[in-house]
Amino acid sequence: MEFVVVIPARYASTRLPGKPLADICGKPMIQHVYEKACLSGASKVVIATDHQKVFDAAKHFTNDVLMTREDHQSGTERLAEVVDLLNLSEDTIVVNVQGDEPLLSPDNVSQVATLLAQSTAPMATLSVAIEERDEVFNPNAVKVVSDINKNALYFSRASIPFDRSAMMAEQQPLNLAPFQRHVGIYAYRAGFIKQYIQLSVSPLEVLESLEQLRVLYHGYAIKIEQAVVTPHAGVDTPEDLAKVVAHIQSKARE
């Protein structure tokens, strides 16, 4: 099985300006992500950026970097441009890896690519078990429910599935076993990426602010299974960055 990894790397970030270039133990963040993705077994790993500074920095460690347009409204639109620029065949499996995950697990990248390859679905993603009660009710933690065939049924910021017995009885403990948090890594068939951006925006994705709901709304399948490695959190703030630096320094001392 062959697959391509694309790492979108936007320079602009409200909470951490120039995020892809943030220094982590002597390397820009985007280089850490690239090197982890290269360990996944991908036939090609490509960085797609909208900023010259990121392009120039990436050129110091790889030639597989593309300059893309600045006016894309979503990461999927940027991905569609990359598919065109690379002239990928419609059946090529493309894994979209976020550029702000320097602690990315290569095993999860290969897992989501394999999950898609072994199905006829146009798209696949991963989840992890929820282990803290507060996360069930945290709207920033996207929950997902799936069927017996590993098809996602719905994604929501609400606490799904709704545990009626526990929710209606205030003193009854909540069983966390059914709850899964969505992990934002996706594998697509290249042809579907271009098809996706032609689909009309769904009312569900607007309500939940979850782009993947457009796929389900239009009747397409999304394969999902639990990640083999529980992912570390990405970097959104200076505090997140400090935690990643401390983690890598700690690992280096072991």
Image: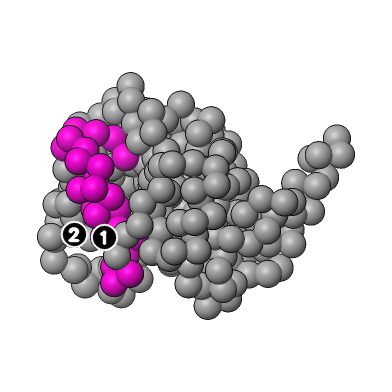
Amino acid beneath label 1? Glu
Residue at x-position 86% and y-position 39% = 253
Of the numbered discs in the image, which one, if any, rests on residue 197?
2
- Identify the magenta region: 70-94
Q: Which residue is mark 1?
A: 77
Residue at x-position 55% and y-position 43% = 61
Q: Seen from this angle, which residue lies furthest right?
A: 253
Along the viewing direction, whichever of 253 and 163 lies nearer the viewer: 253
Q: Seen from this angle, which residue lies furthest top?
A: 1
Inspect the magenta stretch and tell me whether residue 191 lies in it. Answer: no
Question: 198 left or right of 42?
Answer: left
Amino acid beneath label 2? Ile
Inspect the magenta stretch and tell me whether residue 83 lies in it. Answer: yes
Residue at x-position 82% and y-position 45% = 250
Q: Is residue 154 above or below residue 120?
A: below
- Check whether the beta carbons of the residues at disc 1 and disc 2 lie within 8 A of each other: yes
Along the viewing direction, whichever of 160 and 140 lies nearer the viewer: 140
* x and y, in percent, of residue 64 in the image: 41, 42
Of the numbered discs in the image, which one, if any, rests on residue 25?
none
Residue at x-position 25% and y-position 42% = 86
Secondary structure at numbered mark 1: helix
